[in-house]
Amino acid sequence: MNKNRKRDFPLALWLLFETAAVILWLALDNLFYLLNFSYIGACLSFGLLFYQKNISCARNLVQFAAGLYMLVYLGVLCRENMQIEGFWYYLFLGVFEAAVIHYLAAKILGPFFFGRGWCGYACWTAMVLDLLPYKTPQRPRRKFQWIRYLVFLTSLLFVGALFVLGVPNLEDVLFCSFLAGNLLYYAVGIALAFALKDNRAFCKYICPVTVFLKPASYFSLLRIKNDPQRCRSCGKCRQVCPMDVDVPDNRRSRRNGTECILCLRCVEECPGKSLHL
């Protein structure tokens, strides 16, 4: 990224979120959306500024600022199920608010612009997993990706069954599923990280949200690119990538290309400075 773009990018990102905040506020006549998207946009923009100032924990700070806001404030205090079950619930109700808007903005349409950036900067599960000791995968990637599709289908069938069976107090049931689901995600994620020596094993094999994220991420405007004139073909970027992306390959079809979480570890470690956004 050249110096001018590097300087302007945090501002452009903030303006993007602020535009969405104002549009949703006016369209839905709800001040919450103005505050919500303004806060998240500010977190991301300040995080990028901190990163540009070489503050090593900048991304972790953003993860906790955005992740805890959605987990604790929206999820626990406001009782909004921000897990995938909440998306199915509001979708079945025909309510275009809360989790539906969140999923459209962050996980269905958003990846056309910023790929899997959600996973790297806002996911409240990953904010904990990224603190574990295996930041660089210690073992080859397994062929367990099918599990995420099973979890995805299970979540859909679970919420669908609640409606078909006419279970009373659905909001209370969904709130309990939110609490139980998060505890289960943390337990499974931490166990997998230590078993496979890979902090991001949960993201690669289990997380159902990636089913939404992957298709649009293929076309993402924001992606890591390699300058072949400066590349030393040392393989360092592949070694440090937590998601096993074939980083030097500029093709969109590169190995695990839709898995990139924009953590920028490859950019930091590249000895030839050939990688950029």
Image (cartoon, helix red, strand yellow):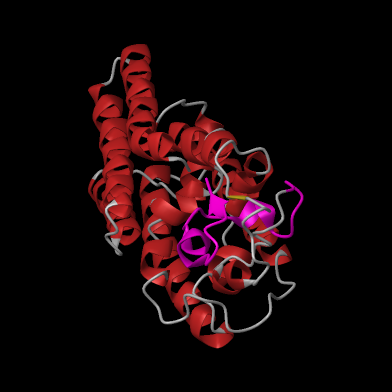
Identify the main secondary structure in magenta: loop
Q: Residue furthest bottom?
A: 195
Residue 35 spot, x, y in % from top left: 24, 30
Vertical side of 254 occupied by 14: above or below: above
Residue 14 spot, x, y in % from top left: 33, 31
Q: Residue at x 68, y 80 (%)?
A: 140
Q: Quadrant of residue 16?
A: top left
Of 171 and 11, which appears nearest the observer? 11
Q: Residue at x 68, y 66 (%)?
A: 147
- Residue 75 can be seen, yes or no: no
How many numbered markers are drawn? 0
Of 65 and 209, which appears nearest the observer? 65
| Range of magenta residues | 251-277
Residue 47 spot, x, y in % from top left: 30, 49
Vertical side of 181 occupied by 155: above or below: above
Vertical side of 6 occupied by 254: above or below: below
* In this picture, residue 270 sits left or right of residue 44: right
* In this picture, residue 43 sits left or right of residue 159: left
Residue 248 covered by magenta stretch: no
Residue 66 spot, x, y in % from top left: 31, 49
Q: Residue at x 64, y 50 (%)?
A: 211
Q: Quadrant of residue 11?
A: top left
Of 53 and 166, which appears nearest the observer? 53
Q: Residue furthest front?
A: 229
* In this picture, residue 42 sits left or right of residue 81: left
Residue 262 covered by magenta stretch: yes
